[in-house]
Image (cartoon, rainbow, N blue to C red):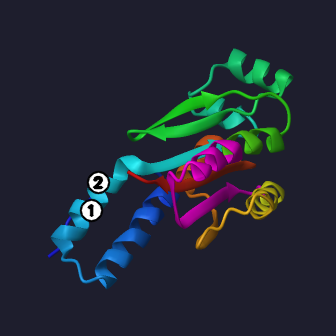
C-alpha cells in the first residue's frame, strides 16, 4: 500500500520530506502514519533561492522586459521563496550574489538562534553556483551552525530552467 503526499515544493524540498519519510519508516511507522506526519511537515519546509540574472525569468514570462533590463542595470538579485506551492519574490537585494546569500543565511541563522529549525537535514542547492555554495557552507561553519546532515545538491530542472545558471538556495524544515 502506498500514499501520495503533495509536497507543494521543488526537488530539494521534496528530498527533505523523503529523508523524513525514511526516518519514520526506520522508526517502524506504517505507510499511513508516515503520510500523516509528512502532510504536517509540508507547510514547514522552507525553500528560498537567490537568482543571479533575470534573463530566464523574462524568457519564462515571469518578468517583463523592462523589469529584466532595470534588474540587470541595478544588479538586482531577487530572492524567491516557495509559499504554499507558489514561487513568490521575497526580497530584491542589489549588488553581488554574496549579498543575496547573506540575506538568506541571516534569515536562517535567526531562526536557528530561536531554536526554530530542524537541523537534522539542511540542503544548499544550486545551479552552477559553486563559489556561493562554498561561501554558504563556510558561513554555517563560522557561525557554529551544527547541521547533522548538510546536503549540497544541484538544482533540478524547474529552478534551473526558470531561474538560470548561478541560482542558489537553502532549504530546511522549521519546527512546529
**Residue that appears at 40% across and 41% down:** 85
Q: Residues within 10 Å of mark 1 (few under 14, many from 20)?
A: some
As drawn, the label of residue 14 is none
Q: Does residue 93 belong to the magenta stretch? A: no
In-front residue for pair 57/98: 98
Residue 88 is left or right of residue 77, and the answer is left
As helix, strand or loop, the secondary structure at mark 2 comes to helix
**Residue that appears at 59% across and 42% down:** 162
As helix, strand or loop, the secondary structure at mark 1 comes to helix
From this view, report whether residue 90 is shown above or below residue 98.
Answer: above
As drawn, the label of residue 40 is 2
Q: Position of residue 90 (x, y in %)?
A: 59, 30
**Residue that appears at 57% across and 33% down:** 60
Q: Position of residue 120 (x, y in %)?
A: 52, 69
Residue 176 is left or right of residue 78, and the answer is left
The quadrant in which residue 65 appears is: top right
CB under 8 Å between callouts 1 and 2? yes
In-front residue for pair 122/18: 122
In-front residue for pair 143/95: 143
As drawn, the label of residue 37 is 1
Q: Position of residue 150 (x, y in %)?
A: 63, 69
Residue 4 appears in view: no
Q: Position of residue 147 (x, y in %)?
A: 62, 68
Q: Tell me the magenta residue range.
A: 105-129
Q: Does residue 118 belong to the magenta stretch? A: yes
Q: Residues within 10 Å of mark 2 (few under 14, many from 20)?
A: few
From this view, report whether residue 18 is shown above or below residue 54.
Answer: below
Amino acid at each position: 500500500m502506498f500514499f501520495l503526499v503533495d509536497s507543494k515544493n521543488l526537488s530539494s524540498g521534496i528530498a527533505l520530506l523523503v529523508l523524513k519519510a525514511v526516518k519514520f519508516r526506520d522508526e517502524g511507522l506504517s505507510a499511513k502514519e508516515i503520510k500523516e506526519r509528512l502532510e504536517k511537515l509540508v507547510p514547514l519546509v522552507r525553500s528560498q533561492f537567490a537568482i543571479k540574472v533575470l534573463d530566464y525569468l523574462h524568457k519564462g514570462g515571469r518578468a517583463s522586459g523592462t523589469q529584466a533590463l532595470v534588474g540587470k542595470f541595478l544588479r538586482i538579485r531577487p530572492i524567491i521563496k516557495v509559499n504554499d506551492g507558489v514561487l513568490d519574490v521575497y526580497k530584491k537585494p542589489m549588488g553581488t550574489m554574496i549579498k543575496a546569500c547573506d540575506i538568506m543565511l541571516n534569515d536562517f541563522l535567526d531562526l536557528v538562534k530561536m531554536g526554530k529549525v530542524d537541523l537534522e537535514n539542511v540542503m544548499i542547492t544550486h545551479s552552477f553556483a559553486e563559489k556561493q555554495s562554498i561561501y554558504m557552507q563556510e558561513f554555517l561553519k563560522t557561525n557554529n551552525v551544527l547541521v547533522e546532515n548538510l546536503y549540497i545538491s544541484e538544482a533540478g530542472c524547474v529552478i534551473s530552467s526558470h531561474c538560470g545558471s548561478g541560482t542558489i538556495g537553502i532549504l530546511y524544515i522549521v519546527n512546529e
